[in-house]
Image (spheres, rainbow, N blue to C red):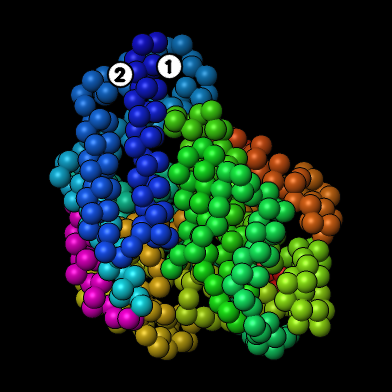
């Protein structure tokens, strides 16, 4: 129908604008001179305002309404239904936001990232606090515009994970937390299996880069459609259907820091590369949620990259780049990359303690948006929670509340998707192994193609045809729960 064709044309134009903005964002984090941030903020604000203007026109709402009637009366195919469903969702959220709020949020966000980077480098929260206060205020305005049934935080969470609610996540975390604490205690009582500094050594960046590229290529990341660069905080940015940018950071004394960063971001990247490229300009060609996206990154980082099978193949190759690793046994290597102990930094946390980091951020964010916590008081509350949950005394802001980039971009409601990703990753891995029993044997031989093919068919290619809960249920046979994840952790750390 004519209205559907008009929406497709508009969707393509908005996708071009969005991808251009994503490219500018990637450049800001990797290549842009520091003094360029002011103008970059204006560029990104302009693109955001332009996209908003194109999308919120009254005739667009009329086109969507006409398509809804057509789909309902003629049982449109799944892709058409998904496109119309997501156009409606995006339109309803966009039309309630004043243009000035959209533009201002984008501009403050771009400036906030640079300020956060400076504050993190100097380990001084007070540098970042004024920008964070602005972003919190703007996000609260957005939440009020969106509307909500239970709490303002839900309306922000909805932007990252369709259908998720803080009350339901609170229940999930309440069930998960004591299990993780008990597991961590049992692991601690068993004592360390290898020395903490077992992997300490000299790891030149150029050799880390070469090894990481070999690993990323082997698991399936396509470098003809992607690249790896360096950033303060590792991330993956898809800037087109055949252009996916990964970043990582390097530790000269520990090569696994950059390696697991690459495995994590390559998981995101292979999801982006696996989405239907011919539908990139349509809602159905996008990733459906952050909880699904994180399932892919956590799966390749942890279920593959920390597995015995992975290191059976890759330890000898790693020793080729870093000769002192040749003295390690396979057991030593597996234990070294699967140590569990409380730590300050989320991105370096082990699988057992990782979700506790997410719970801390989830609680802090809820307190911010309920009005219980002022921005100025975040460091004190953060440090208090770290002491309570991890028995750790936070040494400085850089290792405390300034360690993550998300708040500098106004991404409130994002953090819970990491834990949803963990739960989904465990279910998906179990289901893939059930369907393809040879997967572990193949990984031990350096072949990840069967696992990637399964993920492609079950998760990547459907795009956003199904909402997150339905997608996971179709792939695994059950809705998201903590059962498979806890079984995975017990098997890996206590087995």
Residue 456 percent location from the top left of the image: 65, 40
Q: Quadrant of residue 332?
A: bottom right
250 relative to 99 in the view: left or right = right
Query: Which residue is pictured at 20% across the width and 46% down the height?
Result: 103
The circle on residue 281 is none
Quadrant that contains the C terminus: bottom right
The circle on residue 71 is 1
Q: Quadrant of residue 195?
A: bottom right
Query: Which residue is pictured at 58% across the width and 79% down the height?
Result: 252
Query: Which residue is pictured at 26% across the width and 64% down the height?
Result: 35
- Based on the picture, tell me whether residue 126 belongs to the magenta stretch: yes
Find the magenta span and give its range: 122-141
In terms of depth relative to the viewer, which is nearer, 97 or 321?
Answer: 321
In terms of depth relative to the viewer, which is nearer, 232 or 336?
Answer: 232
Compared to 162, does 370 lie above or below?
Answer: below
Residue 222 seen from this side: yes
Q: Give the structural element (helix, strand or loop) at label 1.
A: helix
Quadrant that contains the N terminus: top left
Compared to 327, does 266 lie above or below?
Answer: above
Query: Which residue is pictured at 35% across the width and 75% down the height?
Result: 120
Q: How many numbered circles does the render carry?
A: 2
- Based on the picture, tell me whether residue 187 belongs to the magenta stretch: no
**Magenta stretch: dominant SS?**
helix
Residue 244 percent location from the top left of the image: 52, 47
């Amino acid at each position: 129908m004519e209205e559907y064709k008009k929406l497709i044309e508009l969707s393509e134009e908005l996708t071009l604008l969005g991808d251009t903005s994503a490219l500018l964002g990637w450049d800001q984090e990797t290549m842009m001179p520091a003094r360029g941030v002011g103008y970059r903020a204006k560029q990104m604000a302009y693109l955001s305002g332009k996209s908003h203007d194109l999308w919120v026109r009254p005739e667009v709402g009329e086109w969507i309404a006409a398509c809804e009637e057509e789909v309902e009366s003629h049982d449109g195919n799944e892709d058409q239904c998904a496109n119309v469903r997501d156009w409606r969702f995006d339109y309803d959220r966009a039309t309630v936001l004043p243009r000035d709020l959209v533009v201002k949020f984008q501009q403050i966000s771009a400036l906030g990232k640079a300020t956060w980077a400076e504050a993190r480098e100097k380990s001084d929260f007070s540098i970042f606090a004024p920008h964070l206060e602005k972003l919190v205020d703007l996000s609260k305005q957005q939440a009020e515009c969106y509307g909500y049934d239970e709490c303002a935080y839900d309306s922000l969470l909805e932007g990252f994970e369709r259908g998720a609610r803080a009350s339901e996540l609170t229940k999930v975390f309440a069930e998960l937390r004591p299990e993780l604490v008990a597991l961590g205690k049992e692991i601690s009582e068993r004592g360390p299996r290898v020395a903490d500094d077992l992997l300490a050594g000299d790891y030149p960046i150029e050799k880390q880069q070469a090894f990481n590229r070999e690993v990323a290529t082997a698991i399936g990341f396509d470098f003809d459609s992607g690249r790896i660069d360096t950033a303060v905080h590792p991330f993956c940015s898809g800037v087109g259907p055949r252009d996916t940018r990964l970043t990582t950071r390097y530790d000269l004394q520990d090569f696994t820091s950059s390696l697991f960063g690459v495995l994590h971001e390559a998981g995101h990247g292979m999801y982006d590369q696996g989405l239907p490229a011919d539908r990139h300009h349509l809602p159905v060609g996008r990733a459906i949620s952050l909880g699904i996206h994180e399932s892919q990154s956590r799966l390749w980082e942890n279920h593959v990259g920390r597995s015995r099978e992975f290191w059976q193949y890759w330890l000898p190759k790693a020793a080729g780049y870093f000769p002192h690793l040749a003295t390690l046994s396979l057991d030593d290597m597996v234990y070294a990359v699967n140590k569990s102990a409380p730590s300050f930094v989320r991105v370096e946390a082990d699988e057992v303690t990782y979700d506790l980091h997410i719970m801390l951020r989830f609680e802090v964010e809820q307190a911010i948006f309920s009005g219980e916590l002022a921005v100025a008081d975040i460091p004190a509350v953060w440090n208090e929670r770290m002491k309570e949950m991890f028995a750790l005394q936070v040494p400085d802001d850089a290792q405390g509340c300034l360690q993550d980039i998300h708040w500098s971009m106004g991404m409130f409601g994002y953090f819970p998707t990491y834990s949803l990703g963990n739960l989904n990753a465990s279910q998906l891995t179990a289901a893939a192994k059930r369907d393809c029993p040879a997967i572990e044997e193949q990984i031990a031989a350096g072949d990840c193609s069967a696992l990637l093919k399964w993920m492609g068919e079950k998760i990547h290619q459907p795009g956003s045809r199904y909402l997150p809960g339905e997608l996971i249920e179709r792939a695994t046979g059950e809705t998201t729960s903590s059962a498979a994840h806890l079984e995975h952790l017990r098997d890996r750390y206590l087995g």
